[in-house]
Image (cartoon, grey):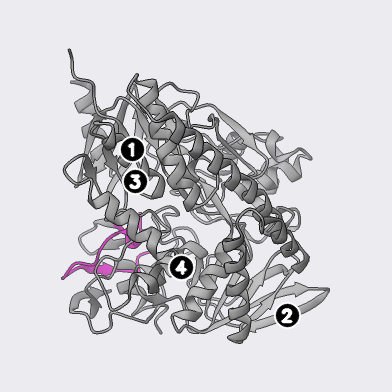
Amino acid sequence: MSERPQPLIVGAGPAGIRAAEALVAAGLRPLVVDEAPACGGQIYRQRLVPDRRSTRDLYGPEAPKAEALHRDFAALDGKLDYWPQALLWNLRDGRADIMVEGTSRQVAYDGLVLATGATDRTLPIPGWTLPGVFTLGGAQIALKSQGCAIGSEIVFLGSGPLLYLVAWQYMKAGAKVAAVLDTAPFTAKFNLLRGLPLFPGIVLRGMRMTAELKLGGVGLHYGVADVRIEGKNAIEAIAWRQDGMEHRLACDGVGYGLALRSETQAADLAGCRFAFNQRDRAALPERDAAGRTSVPGVYIAGDGAGIAGADAAERAGERAALALLQDRGLPHDATRAAALEAELARIGRFREVLEAAFPFPAHWMRDIADSTTLCRCEEITAGEVRSAIGQFGVHELNRLKAVSRVGMGRCQGRICGAAAAELLAHETHRGIEAVGRLRGQAPVKPVPLTLALAAQQEAAE
Amino acid sequence: MALLRRLVRADHPAIPFTLDGEPCEGRAGDTVLTAILTQAERLRLSEFSASPRAGFCQMGACQDCWIVLESGERLRACSTALSPGMRILTRRARAA
């Protein structure tokens, strides 16, 4: 019997860890590749070195989950192959190109679990390229992983549960939080009451955090619009409109995010079929309840498959691994699989509640000033994108990329893609679902040219 | 003035490096991004308008924090650990 290649798991966050655990339990030996130096993903990211803080200081009420994941993954040592600080930069012909330890390696795999996670979703606003403006996730990493605050008078801006969580974590860590600016009206939060029967603990915790921020003297502002970050070479203030009134607050750090967006480039390179998802306002890989994509042997789990959070990611990772086992004709626990799917469905219903409580301000792109930088990499303004759309009669996102360079920079559209799609939809009077999606391109992140050439040479031999 | 404010690890072992030729110290456990921004206000100047940038996502997604060493080597500041003797430039406009 010829030996089959090992399954490949991309990402060592909650989904990747639980997938690895389930495959190892079934006697397989997966290869896990992850960009970070240690497992945990973004939410349970570990420090580079220990410091005086406890895991409770770092992860708050989620500390036991973080500890369990880190411990359970460590316990798999010797039963799997694990490449930290490894970048999967291409997938072709059943092989993965992975940059690790300064070289690129081609890996054949039999079964692929994509657990690539998510990054902050943002829309361009004036001043968002200024030093000191970070995504909410970035602000959280500075604090959790590096023990630094992003300023001495910090404003948190945006939408989504992370907005309040990060503000609360900063306050608890002793940083000065000047204000929380929520882009949704206060009334949107009433939707959370619908979430009480589903996940009372999460809703109550959110309410407690908000109350503690208020008690701590942090100004909470709802329904903020027309937000501008002011300053020439550094942040001086943040200005906004609220209930028809102009407001301005001095600050030197801004954490900003509008919930999350899935990292789907690897699924694209794997050839997965995508479908537009109304809730996430993005094209996502098609998948069944178990995490099977349209490509046999390719599975997807966690926030990279659609935003659902870390608890869902743990379950989806395990569920996808069970599907892989089943498809390989190996014994798998069908009862467990059904239970996981039921839990995922319940979390999915809760996601609808969160989406209503923290709506995405897509309408910002309707009114965006021509002078605002839309693409940070290539420094293209909203006005330049508008004229490209008009001048070339563009209706599709990849065409827009070709004529304007939006999405062609180093971030490959991770940061500007959502904004470009919304602007294109508005300018062409079409629904966001009708403008297409940016195709994933290898390398999905910058790699040295010498590495890519060496890998090609190896493939040719 | 520094952009980032250190809340912990101030007492960790020092790691020497240079920033635009000036001797500086980071702390064990620092990324290059943290080491620079606890001393300075920016990481680099943007390619087209030479406006200051200091990264954005800190998780290797936005690619806004690529900096250059005196040797010409480029690296992503948020996902690279600081190592002793790094000679970092933030003044050069073309960082990648």
Horizontal and vertical percent position of residue A65: 40, 58
Alpha carbons under labels 3 and 1: distance apart: 9 Å
Q: Identity of the amino acid at label 4?
A: Pro
User: Who's the residue at 23% across and 45% down the image?
Assistant: A76
Give, as a single range, the part of the protein colored magenta: B75-96
User: Who's the residue at 19% across and 75% down the image?
Assistant: B15
Asked whether A435 falls inside the magenta stretch, the response is no
Q: Which of A251 and A281 is in front in this view?
A: A281
Crowding near the residue tagged with mark 1, few <14, some 14–19, many ≥20 C-alpha atoms within 10 Å: many
Q: Identity of the amino acid at label 1?
A: Ala
Question: What SS does tag 3 mark?
Answer: helix
Alpha carbons under labels 3 and 2: distance apart: 45 Å
Give the residue pinned by disc 4: A61
Give the residue pinned by disc 2: A247
Give the residue pinned by disc 1: A22
For the stretch drawn in magenta, what is the main secondary structure?
loop
**Mark 3, mark 4: which one is toward the viewer?**
4
Q: Which chain carries label 4?
A: A
